[in-house]
Image (cartoon, rainbow, N blue to C red):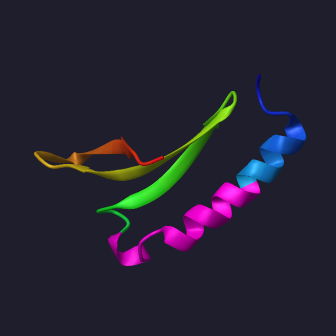
Amino acid sequence: MAFTELEIKRHEKITSDFIEKRRPPVAVRDQVDLSYRMSNNSIEIFEIRPLWNKPDRKIEEPVA
């Protein structure tokens, strides 16, 4: 079952606060960063970083 509108707003606030507290300093965010996405009834937290052999390409690695 998908989140209701009220749940979406609540989860976005909680998750945004959680991610902001844990993001790396601005100076290194082009090398590693954290983000999240919501879909249906799940929230995925992932790390964003350059691909090791193609640094111009970004990859997302799931965290939680």
Residue under the point 79% across and 42% down: 8
Q: Residue at x 40, y 60 (%)?
A: 33
Say whether residue 24 is left or right of residue 21: left
Residue situated in front as seen by the camera: 4 or 25: 4
Residue at the (76%, 26%) spot, across then down? 2
**Residue at the spot 65% in from the left edge and 56% down from the top edge:** 15
Residue, far left: 53
> Image quadrant of residue 29?
bottom left
Q: Is residue 27 above or below residue 55?
A: below
> Magenta stretch containing residue 22, yes or no?
yes
Q: Position of residue 1 (x, y in %)?
A: 77, 22
Rendering coords of residue 44 (x, y %): 54, 42
The reply, left or right, for residue 54 in relation to residue 39 is left
**Magenta region, residue range:** 13-28
Q: In the image, is 56 to the left or to the right of 47?
A: left
Q: Is residue 8 magenta?
A: no
Judged by its main secondary structure, the magenta piece is helix
Question: How far from the left and from the top, in percent, is residue 41?
Answer: 69, 31
Identify the residue at the far right of this view.
Answer: 6
**Image location (x, y in percent) of residue 62:** 40, 43
Q: How many marks?
A: 0
